[in-house]
Image: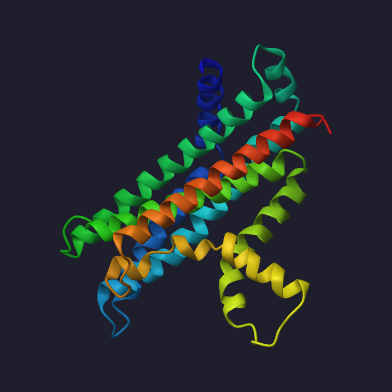
Amino acid sequence: MMSVFMVMRESFLLLRRDKIFLPAVVAGVLITVFANVASDWGIEEFRKILFDVGALGFHITGSLVAIFWGTKTVSEARTDGSLEIQLAAPISRVSWLIGKYLGLLLGLIFFWVLVLIFWQCIMLLNNFGPLEGPQFMFFVFQLIEWALVGAVAVFYSTFAGVTIALFATISTWMAGLVSMPVAQNLPPQAKGLAVDVVQGLARFWDLRQFNLAGYATGVEKISPGEIQVRGIYGILLILIVITVSCIFFRRRDVLA
């Protein structure tokens, strides 16, 4: 456990000092400000527009940060030789990889807390008071999605270079966003392997489950039971991806 903690701590400190961290924080602030300004442009309810714009901005910004950080934390360690040095110490590959992911997760949580603080300030400035339960759950599920996307980036980085890992992660992320809409719009007579793949992807890899913007504004009604199912779904996906990553990483040449 101590070795995992040390790797996690080092990974978190490196990510916090990374060049992308400050621009990501600035982007989070600008998204919050833009969402507030855009809310005054429409004729719809202020809060709905606020969360719709915020959901899109935070989803893209947080996911991209998770992708770049998740790819960088493993791929760079493989290419710059630091992985070889760390594995020379009494630490297993699995412990090292778990520590790296936990450091990534800690960095995402830190970024998430800053975003949440800025958003709460906007809510208070507009006399909406503190975040209510559904609004807070909106941000919780944003974090779950970021953590899942980061896990996918770590997975690809265990056996691919930075460029390929970035491309593969972004492609997988986009597939999760469009899988369900595509499956729902397939013609009834459509059959074949491609249709089976799309339907299977929509069933097991649907990232839209983590978008609770409608629930936060009261437009979409979601039962507490379904909220729990979605949360468990996200956590299970993260655990599965990290487990598979550990299996791949354990069995391959770290210098390949």
Q: Position of residue 43 (x, y in %)?
A: 28, 86
| Residue 50 seen | yes
In this rendered view, identify the residue nearer to me: 12 or 222. Answer: 222
Q: Position of residue 248 (x, y in %)?
A: 73, 36
Residue occupying the point 72% across, 55% down: 167
Q: Position of residue 171 (x, y in %)?
A: 68, 60
| Residue 23 seen | no
Q: Is residue 183 left or right of residue 16?
A: right
Residue occupying the point 67% across, 70% down: 198
Work out which residue is located at the far top of the displayed protein and give it: 90
Q: Is residue 188 above or below residue 157?
A: below
The picture quadrant where one finds residue 136 is bottom left
Q: Position of residue 22 (x, y in %)?
A: 48, 45
Q: Is residue 121 above or below residue 50?
A: above
What is the count of numbered marks? 0
**Colouring rule applied to residues:** rainbow
Residue occupying the point 50% across, 57% down: 61
Residue occupying the point 37% across, 61% down: 226
- The C terminus sits in image quarter: top right
In this rendered view, identify the residue nearer to me: 122 or 185. Answer: 185
In this rendered view, identify the residue nearer to me: 177 or 109. Answer: 177
Q: Is residue 110 above or below residue 3?
A: below
Q: Is residue 213 above or below residue 144?
A: below
The picture quadrant where one finds residue 179 is bottom right
In this rendered view, identify the residue nearer to me: 179 or 20. Answer: 179
Q: Is residue 124 left or right of residue 8?
A: left
The picture quadrant where one finds residue 15 is top right
